[in-house]
Image: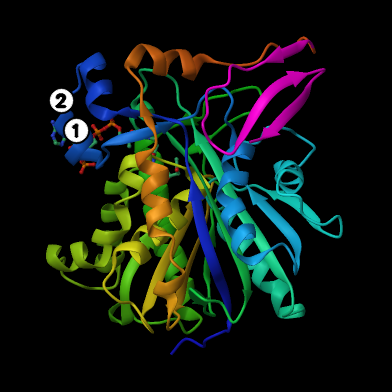
Amino acid sequence: MAGDSAIGIHDLSFATTEFVLTHTELARHNGTDIGKYHQGIGQRSMSVPATDEDIVTMGAAAAAPLIARHGGDGIRTIIFATESSIDQAKSAGVYVHSLLGLASATRVVELKQACYGATAALQFAIGLVRRDPAQRVLVVAADIAKYEPDSPGEATQGAAAVAMLIGADPALLRIEEPSGVFTADVMDFWRPNYREAALVDGQESIGAYLLAVEGSWKDYTEHGGRAPDEFAAFCYHQPFTKMAYKAHRHLLNYCGYDIDEDRVARDLGLTTAYNNVIGNSYTASLYLALAALLDQAEDLTGRAIGFLSYGSGSVAEFFAGSVVPGYREHLRTTAHRAAIDRRRPVDHARYRELHGHSFPTDGGDHRTAAETTGPFRLAALRGHKRVYESR
Ligand code: CAA
């Protein structure tokens, strides 16, 4: 039986973009049978950032409600996880720290390993809190998933940020020991520094993900983890929601179970509600699955949830959390639904304009149009410096 730890997720909030492109609109443009998107990959729409939104504005918008509820006291570390970094040197977390008005006595750092980064941040945060239980760590996971137009990956874009407050005696979820970890050097998905859009070998990436499920689960069980039947639900990284189903069937098969589709639906059904309308949000995706589960499930008090975090390249981790009594009083279900519902639909032509937007690299004063109605905006790139504004 896995051991409990009294450190975990105290609060969780997410933000997404100003705009949304439906898969119906994408299919209308490229002639794809809509069944491929709705049933085949399990996606209905994807979040599209305005020109004045990026990982910083989304990250700050996700984190602001945590600071409003708990204050900034006790936060001595911010870990910003992303694979859509805006600077090779400066952490996006420093901008978020400034926008949120947090104390100067804070360490801030950015972490990267594809979609796995937020889980590394969570585990590192737990280590810091174990050393000093009075501290809280703000973990921000924010990404914009961008592929070439008209490529197979195009339908699996999206964007969002999740912010989590990690601390002792958490109100939502205790993260347990052990973790199962796995690394393999594969080129399934990557983005060289000179490219805006990721490169991907789609089928290879699915195979690499499944191999990582096996590897991390094997390590998890070898370190004394729970048995599959002990979990009330499983949250998977969801590049597209059908991937969670592929992964879970693979796990059950690997564990020697016959595949029972009712069981698969029970284990995963509530975890896909946010990802299937937001799209891939890379490192935030796993924690959007958790938000969807907690926001919708009847009552998970005391139940175990399994997590499979996968980051291409590749690194994976399987770990468990147990749901804290009273957690439902701390959920942000209404705000989460509002973050999704407030998005304004764009047509295909506007989406392509937004997809193609980038700043000139001449060091001039380049202002952005005021498009986002969110609490923070990227107002300009001036002298190669990003200029943010709060509302
Ligand atoms: N009605 C219903 N279903 C249909 C259909 C129709 N009319 N037409 C096709 N389908 C089904 C197919 O049968 C297939 O289902 P299965 O996977 O169950 O066989 C599904 O729709 C997708 O069809 P294809 O495999 O033909 O789709 P594709 O070749 O265009 O690409 C993809 C799909 C590989 C996922 C592509 O979107 C892609 O490259 N995405 C980016 C990479 C990615 O997300 N990889 C996931 C693992 S890597 C990872 O997790 C990290 C990360 O975040 C990137």
Which is nearer the eye, 206 or 295? 295
- Does the residue at mark 1 contact the one at mark 2 (Cβ under 8 Å)? yes
- Residue 311 visible in the snapshot: no
- Tell me which corner region of the image, top left, top right, bottom left or bottom right, holds residue 345: top left
- Residue 342 visible in the snapshot: yes
Three-letter amino acid code at the position of disc 1: Lys
Q: Where is residue 148 in the image (x, y as percent from the top left)?
A: 44, 21
Q: Which residue is drawn at 53% across and 73% down?
A: 179
Three-letter amino acid code at the position of disc 2: Asp
Q: Which quarter of the rendered picture does the N terminus lie within?
A: bottom left
Q: Position of residue 306 (x, y in %)?
A: 39, 70
- Tell me which corner region of the image, top left, top right, bottom left or bottom right, holds residue 155: top left
**Residue indicated by mark 1:** 36
Q: Residue 387: within the magenta? A: yes
Which is nearer the eye, 354 or 151? 354
96 with respect to 251 (left or right): right
Asked if 146 appears above or below 367 in the picture, the reply is below
Residues packed near mark 1 inside 10 Å, few (<14), some (14 to 19) or many (20 plus): some
Q: Which quarter of the rendered picture does the C terminus lie within?
A: top right
Give the CA distance from mark 1 to mark 2.
Answer: 6 Å
268 with respect to 290 (left or right): left
Q: Residue 33 carries which label?
A: 2
Asked if 155 appears above or below 268 in the picture, the reply is above
Magenta-tinted stretch: 364-391
Q: Which element is circle 2 on?
A: loop
Which is nearer the eye, 384 or 387? 387
Ligand 1 - quadrant of the structure image:
top left
Q: Does the residue labelled 1 lie within 8 Å of ligand 1?
A: yes
